[in-house]
Image: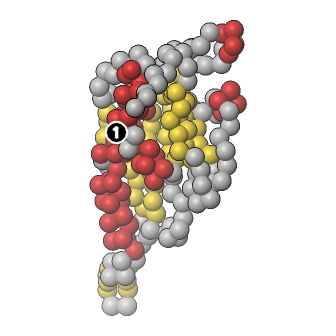
């Protein structure tokens, strides 16, 4: 089997394109800035970053030199940790969120406070955590329509990106392969970053 090792100064793209039912996600990974002759401050000052962008349903990704202006810039370690988190922990978290939403929507949930007085309330479930400097936020409400699109919000300082959970989850299955490619291209993986978990 032929395996190609990317050049250390060549962007590596990890993506899943959009379809007519879901948006897409693209991570442009830069291990080392290319020579400025071709790119002229095309990338961030720091090496080893990921430019994370998303696209709407049935849309193509913008070229990197356009997309980088609105892209969320995170370290490769943070991106790898998000993928590993989605692969290992997200299904269980998603199930817990669904269970709580179903409890809120349950017809037997309204409480009888007194004769002819019943209390019923709507609610929402929020999941948030930090991956180093990257804030991860997910929200579901008991009032959401069954087919309503719910998105993961990732933010670093004043830049953010909205990602479809199912697309990011599917991309997470390529975690080992991506880590192997990055390692062979010269990336040194330092292990999981510190995390602040809240649920």
Where 59 sits versus 156, above or below?
A: below
Q: Farthest bottom residue?
A: 116
Q: Callout 1: 10 Å neighbours few (<14), some, many (20+)?
A: some
SS label for mark 1: helix
Count of all numbered marks drawn on residues in the image? 1
Instruction: Identify residue for label 1.
Output: 84
Query: Does residue 195 appear to the left or right of 39 in the view shown?
Result: left
The residue shown at (31%, 21%) is 190
In this orientation, which residue lies closer to the viewer: 164 or 154? 164
Where 24 sits versus 28, above or below?
A: below
The residue shown at (54%, 64%) is 148
Where 157 sits versus 83, above or below?
A: above
In this orientation, which residue lies closer to the viewer: 123 or 152? 152
Q: Position of residue 199 (x, y in %)?
A: 32, 49
Q: Position of residue 186 (x, y in %)?
A: 41, 16
The chosen color scheme is secondary structure
Q: Quadrant of residue 104?
A: bottom left
Q: Is residue 58 visible?
A: yes
The residue shown at (40%, 32%) is 1
Q: Position of residue 10 (x, y in %)?
A: 55, 20
In this orientation, which residue lies closer to the viewer: 157 or 163? 163
Q: Position of residue 93 (x, y in %)?
A: 32, 53
The residue shown at (50%, 70%) is 146
Q: Is residue 160 visible?
A: no
């Amino acid at each position: 089997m032929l395996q190609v090792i990317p050049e250390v100064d060549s962007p590596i793209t990890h993506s899943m394109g959009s379809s007519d039912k879901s948006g897409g996600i693209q991570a442009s990974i830069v291990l080392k800035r290319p020579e400025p002759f071709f790119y002229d401050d095309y990338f961030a000052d720091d090496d080893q970053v990921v430019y994370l962008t998303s696209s709407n349903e049935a849309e193509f990704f913008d070229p990197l030199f356009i997309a980088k202006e609105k892209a969320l810039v995170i370290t490769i370690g943070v991106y790898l940790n998000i993928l590993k988190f989605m692969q290992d922990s997200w299904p269980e978290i998603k199930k817990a969120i669904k269970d709580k939403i179903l409890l809120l929507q349950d017809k037997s949930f309204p409480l009888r406070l007194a004769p002819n007085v019943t209390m019923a309330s709507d609610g929402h479930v929020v999941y948030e955590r930090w991956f180093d400097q990257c804030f991860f936020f997910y929200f579901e409400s008991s009032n959401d329509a069954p087919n309503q699109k719910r998105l993961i919000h990732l933010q670093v300082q004043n830049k953010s990106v909205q990602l479809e959970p199912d697309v990011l989850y599917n991309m997470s299955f390529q975690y080992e392969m991506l880590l192997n490619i990055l390692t062979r291209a010269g990336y040194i993986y330092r292990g999981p970053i510190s995390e602040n978990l809240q649920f």
